[in-house]
Image (tube, rainbow, N blue to C red):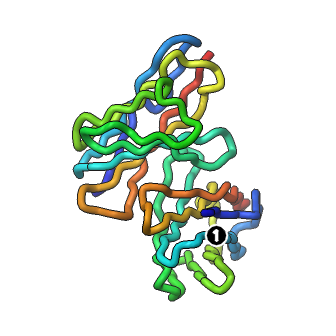
Amino acid sequence: AQKVTQAQTEISVVEKEDVTLDCVYETRDTTYYLFWYKQPPSGELVFLIRRNSFDEQNEISGRYSWNFQKSTSSFNFTITASQVVDSAVYFCALSEARNTDKLIFGTGTRLQVFP
Amino acid sequence: GAVVSQHPSRVICKSGTSVKIECRSLDFQATTMFWYRQFPKQSLMLMATSNEGSKATYEQGVEKDKFLINHASLTLSTLTVTSAHPEDSSFYICSARPAGDSYEQYFGPGTRLTVT
C-alpha cells in the first residue's frame, strides 16, 4: 500500500536556524514520484520539488535542499537559515507511475519560524 | 504560466442548499482535473478525478450524488455540493494537469466552504 508519513506535526524554530522536515514513504512500485509542497496561511499549495525514484541525487535550490534516500524510503527537506516567511505547512506527497492521477499526501508538518 | 483559479474563494451557505465551485486553468488546457478536500489542520484527500468530456472517477467513500463534478471544457471543471450540511464545511482545492503531461498537477488557491 502507498503511504506517506510525516512524523513531525509541528516544529518551531527561531530565524536563521536550520530545520529539517522528515518524510518517509511506502510503495511497492519501483517507479514513483515524490513531491514537496508548501501551504502558507493563505491556503494555496506551492509546488517546491518533484523527484523521480531513479534520481537519488540530492537537490539544492537556494536555502532549500532535499535528501532522497531509497534505502530508508525517505525524502527529507531542509531549510537553511530559516526566515519568518518560511512559516507554513509543508506536505510531502507520493504518486506511483502506474497511477499518476493519485497524489498521496502526508499529514503535513507545520513550521513556525519566530523572529 | 500554469495558473489555476478557483471561484469563489470563500462561500457561506445554509444547510440544504447547493453550492457550486469553479476551477479554471487560465493559461493551459487541462484534460484532467482533480478535486481535493482538506479539513482543518489535516491533509489533502483526493475526492475525484475528472477528465474532460467524461464522467468523474470518485475515490472510495465519496458520495457521487452529493459531490457533482462536471468537466465540460478543457479549462473548466465544477464541483457542486448538493444539499449541503455543516459536516461538508471544508477547504476544497482543485488541481489541473496540462494536456500531454503525465505527472504535474497545478493547484488552485482553494475554496473555503462554510455550511451554517
A52 left or right of B97 in image: right
B14 left or right of B42 in image: left
SS for tag 1?
strand
Residue B14, percent from left and from top: 56, 12
Residue A43, percent from left and from top: 54, 45
Front in this rendered view, residue B35 or B64: B64
User: Compared with residue A48, is residue B4 higher up or lower down, i.e. above or below?
Assistant: above
Front in this rendered view, residue B104 or A27: A27
Residue B51, percent from left and from top: 31, 44
Residue A48, percent from left and from top: 49, 66
- Which quarter shows the N terminus of chain A? bottom right
Q: Residue at x 50, y 28 (%)?
A: B10
Q: Residue at x 27, y 49 (%)?
A: B31
Chain ID of residue with mark 1: A
User: Compared with residue A56, is residue A8 higher up or lower down, i.e. above or below?
Assistant: above
Q: How many other residues sit within 10 Å of disc 1, few (<14), some (14-19) or many (≥20)?
A: few
Q: Residue at x 23, y 52 (%)?
A: B28
Front in this rendered view, residue A61 or A90: A90
Disc 1 marks which residue? A26
User: Compared with residue A55, is residue B113 higher up or lower down, i.e. above or below?
Assistant: above
A25 left or right of A14 in image: left
- Which quarter shows the C terminus of chain A? bottom right
Q: Which corner quadrant of the image does residue A86 belong to? A: bottom right
Which kind of residue does numbered mark 1 sit on? Glu
Q: Residue at x 43, y 25 (%)?
A: B80
